[in-house]
Image (cartoon, helix red, strand yellow):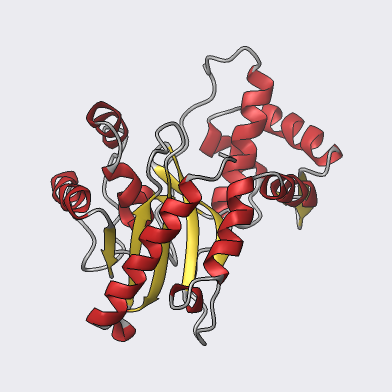
């Protein structure tokens, strides 16, 4: 599970094909601020989105008026309205509520850090998190976006895709994020990992994302249009063969239970 990650470059929006270019650009600006996770200067936003400073200034003014973004020392950051909208989504999504109930009932898995994620293009987005009772709090906040190729949930979901869909997504990966010495160096290495994931029915991140951290993940069966997965993350030093077996059984059970819940 991630502690940090590479941020893919934003494509140019100068010639975006949209029925409402202003809305598309506003959403792209919000996504850029979310990726940055810090206040961003107007000039930097203009470079990232490949738009004129005047266009960015107009977008920022409009978004500030609706509290979607705010000024921080002359820079721009997400506003409280984004939190309100996000909470509204979570409250109205049955699977998130069911995730919280079901994880708390797990005898062993409920003690660990467990996440629910969905696949968005080539990224993983975390929808819900259960912290368990372990003294070390592991990274992976709700709303966090990470490259799917460096996370166990991402690999679990990629492995379940039809081959044409998988290849279309992998074609968008310009380079593999090298986060640790165990990270995959090439897409071919990733493909071999996905083949093993497909064969055994679960994905493993063995310190490929963060040194000292192992993550096990199972995709929700039957989620074709909106791939989703659950994962459990813990310190590698704690993961005995017996604990690994029990946690995998919990994740498989949790994934099956959530797959019967409507809400995606």
Q: Is residue 263 above or below residue 214?
A: above
Q: Is residue 47 among what the camera can see?
A: yes
> Which is more toward the observer, 107 or 111?
107
Which image quadrant for residue 18? top right
Q: Position of residue 109 (x, y in %)?
A: 44, 73
> Which is more toward the observer, 190 or 118?
118
Q: Is residue 130 above or below residue 78?
A: below
Position of the N terminus by quadrant: bottom left
Q: Residue furthest top?
A: 19
Position of the C terminus by quadrant: top right
Q: Is residue 44 among what the camera can see?
A: no
Say left or right for 245 vs 63. Answer: left
Q: Is residue 135 above or below residue 126?
A: below
Total tally of numbered discs in the picture = 0
Q: Position of residue 5 (x, y in %)?
A: 41, 58
Q: Position of residue 202 (x, y in %)?
A: 28, 56
> Which is more toward the observer, 240 or 45?
240
Q: Position of residue 66 (x, y in %)?
A: 84, 38
Q: Residue placed at 35% from the left, 45% from the top?
A: 157
Q: Residue placed at 68% from the left, 27% from the top?
A: 55
Q: Is residue 54 above or below residue 233?
A: above
Q: Residue placed at 60% from the left, 53% from the top?
A: 96
């Amino acid at each position: 599970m991630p502690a940090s990650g590479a941020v893919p470059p934003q494509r140019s929006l100068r010639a975006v094909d949209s029925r409402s270019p202003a809305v598309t650009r506003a959403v792209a600006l919000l996504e850029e601020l979310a990726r940055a996770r810090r206040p961003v200067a107007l000039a930097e936003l203009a470079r990232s989105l490949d738009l004129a400073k005047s266009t960015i200034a107009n977008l920022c003014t409009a978004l500030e008026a609706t509290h979607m973004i705010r000024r921080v020392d002359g820079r721009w950051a997400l506003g409280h309205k984004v939190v309100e909208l996000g909470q509204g989504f979570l409250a109205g999504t049955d699977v998130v509520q069911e995730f919280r109930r079901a994880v708390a009932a797990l005898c062993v898995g409920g003690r660990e850090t467990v996440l629910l994620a969905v696949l968005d293009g080539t990224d993983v987005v975390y929808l819900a998190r259960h912290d368990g009772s372990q003294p070390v709090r592991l990274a992976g906040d709700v709303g966090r976006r990470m490259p799917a190729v460096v996370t166990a949930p991402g690999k679990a979901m990629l492995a379940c895709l039809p081959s044409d869909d998988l290849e279309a997504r992998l074609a968008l990966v310009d380079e593999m994020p090298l986060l640790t010495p165990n990270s995959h160096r090439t897409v071919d290495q990733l493909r071999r990992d996905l083949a093993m994931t497909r064969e055994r029915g679960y994905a493993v991140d063995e310190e490929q994302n963060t040194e000292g951290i192992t993550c096990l993940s199972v995709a929700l069966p039957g989620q074709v249009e909106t791939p989703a997965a659950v994962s459990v993350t813990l310190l590698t030093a704690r993961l005995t063969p017996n604990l690994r077996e029990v946690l995998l059984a919990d994740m498989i059970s949790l994934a099956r239970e959530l797959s019967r819940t409507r809400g995606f």
